[in-house]
Amino acid sequence: MRSTLLFNYDILCELAYWSDEGTCATLMLTCRAMRTAAAKAVLRRPCRLSEARDVHRFLCCLQVDPSCFQHVRELRISFGTLPQEMSGRLLNCLQHLKRLETLVLSDGDDSLTALPGLLDTIAQLITIRKLEVRNAGDVTCRLLSRMQASLTHISLDWLQEDCDFFYSNFPSSSRYPQWPNYHPVPLLSKWRTTLEELECASWFNCPGGLPRYTQIYPKLRRLSIERDDNPRIAPYIHAYPNLTHLCVLSEYDQLWNYSGTALVDGIRLLRIRHATNVRSQEGPDGAKTWPQLQQFEGTLVDLYLLGITCRILRVSLCFSVNPRDLELLPPVLAYAQPQHLKVHGTGMLLAHPRYGLTKLLREPCAARLESLVLGLDFKETEGLDVVTTLNDLAESLKRIPLRRLRLCLNGTNFSLPIPRPDPYNPRARLCTESLPPLRPIPTPTITLEKALWSVDIDAYVQGLADAIPSLEDAIMCIMGEPDDTFDYRTRSAEVVRVRRAEYAADRNVYEWSSYW
């Protein structure tokens, strides 16, 4: 009877497929068959070439068997100078990657310059569909002009080590006339019939007036713009008429770090650029707007800056909404009128007397709202009457056709007045019945965390479910201070009428985990 367990070849190949690179390297030393199987298993994963030893291992795997070339799907290059003999072997192997689909150049111009011939080799690979380049510049532009592949996804980041490409390479006297030529609409026009997704980072292309571009990208659905403090919306609307997903993260999220004259000038410039974008979508020559924009992701300032005048199905406001930005919220919601809203901020997001959500949810801008994901951080709202604020929110929610609610509250040890129950106010009873008895002192106080912890969230959620017939499911969560084990204490309540699939298409809209 054999003392060792034997596996057939198929099982060994499956083990190699799911093993890490170190295990695959060991399997390659066992026999010729496993050498080929383990090499193919490694090449099926993203191949990262960041230094000479990575290139050496990559070449060894490719040279095991001629069929190994067809298993390389994704290649990530970030190396610098390579030995001459290794450079020649690498270029020769790259020419045989006939099924490469994704190429990432982490050091962009530096890698293309460090290895002569790499640019021409990449340009001839016609199977590439997704191209990502960081540290882009003039050499990247030459690569784009020579590429023969039909790209569907392009991601370009023009941020270099010292400064962004545009400011550091264009003399001030000739900067403005040249920049419009580098706008993504004309620069990527070679792929206007195939491009589906575009990511632009540090692509400062609108310092002055822009011509009206004629190129149209009918298949482009997703657009991401990062680190551009003056995105002109009209050229994108003209060129990408069928856009459905938009993500914008400008430099204006740092606006409130300034003070005095710099802050005043920044706010004034923000309003001017907002008005410019709004005007560009009006009139007979305007860009109209996007007819089927389904989702926006960015900060509140970004959405205001763009001045988008169309309805947006889903609005997800990244990062915490600054209380000083709240006056931007009404005009944004008046245009967007979302069906799904995801937002995080301090308690003032609800309690502000003019621009708080409690007030806005009672206005026409919230008439279409079906789902709300709301994260509230009470750590910087000392003195806020939490119970009254939550009851006001409940009254506002009862006026809209809400289907799904996610409400997450976070508190810490700040002192605040204990709200006195009002027997004649039914809104106050819902959350105050579980509060401890009041002491007979003029201004009794408890910590904010205790005030939150004392809220009967089961009754709160059930009260919403009883008052809102359309509500299908609601979850309320309260996070408190960490205990002795540094784990945050959490309480939650849930009411579910309709169970949904765990991996629904819009699942990310209803999660708040990214907030904390």
Image: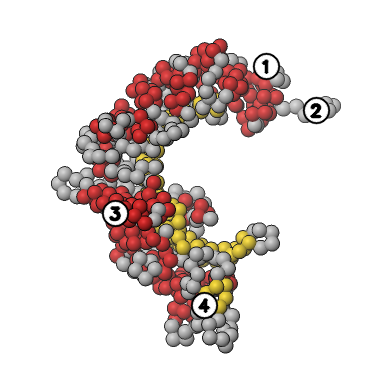
The amino acid sitting under disc 1 is: Arg
At 40% from the left and 53% from the top, the residue drawn is 258
Alpha-carbon span between mark 3 and mark 2: 77 Å
> In what element is the residue under mark 1?
helix
- Residue 95 coordinates in the image, percent (x, y): 47, 16
- Residue 50 coordinates in the image, percent (x, y): 55, 26
At 23% from the left and 38% from the top, the residue drawn is 210
Res. 345 image quadrant: bottom left
The answer to whether residue 497 is visible is no
Q: Which residue is mark 4?
A: 417
* Label 1 vs label 3, nearer the camera: 3
Indicate which disc, 3 or 2, sits on the residue closer to the N terminus. 2
- Residue 160 coordinates in the image, percent (x, y): 43, 33
The amino acid sitting under disc 4 is: Pro
Image position of 177 (left or right of 299)? left
Q: Which residue is mark 1?
A: 32
Res. 2 image quadrant: top right
Asked whether the beta carbons under mark 4 and mark 1 sit within 8 Å of each other, the answer is no
> In what element is the residue under mark 3?
helix
Indicate which disc, 4 or 2, sits on the residue closer to the N terminus. 2
* Label 4 vs label 1, nearer the camera: 4
The correct choice, above or below, for 499 with respect to 44 in the image is: below
Image position of 386 (left or right of 352)? right
> In what element is the residue under mark 2?
loop
Q: Which residue is mark 3?
A: 268
- Residue 470 coordinates in the image, percent (x, y): 40, 66
Alpha-carbon span between mark 4 and mark 2: 73 Å
The amino acid sitting under disc 3 is: Arg
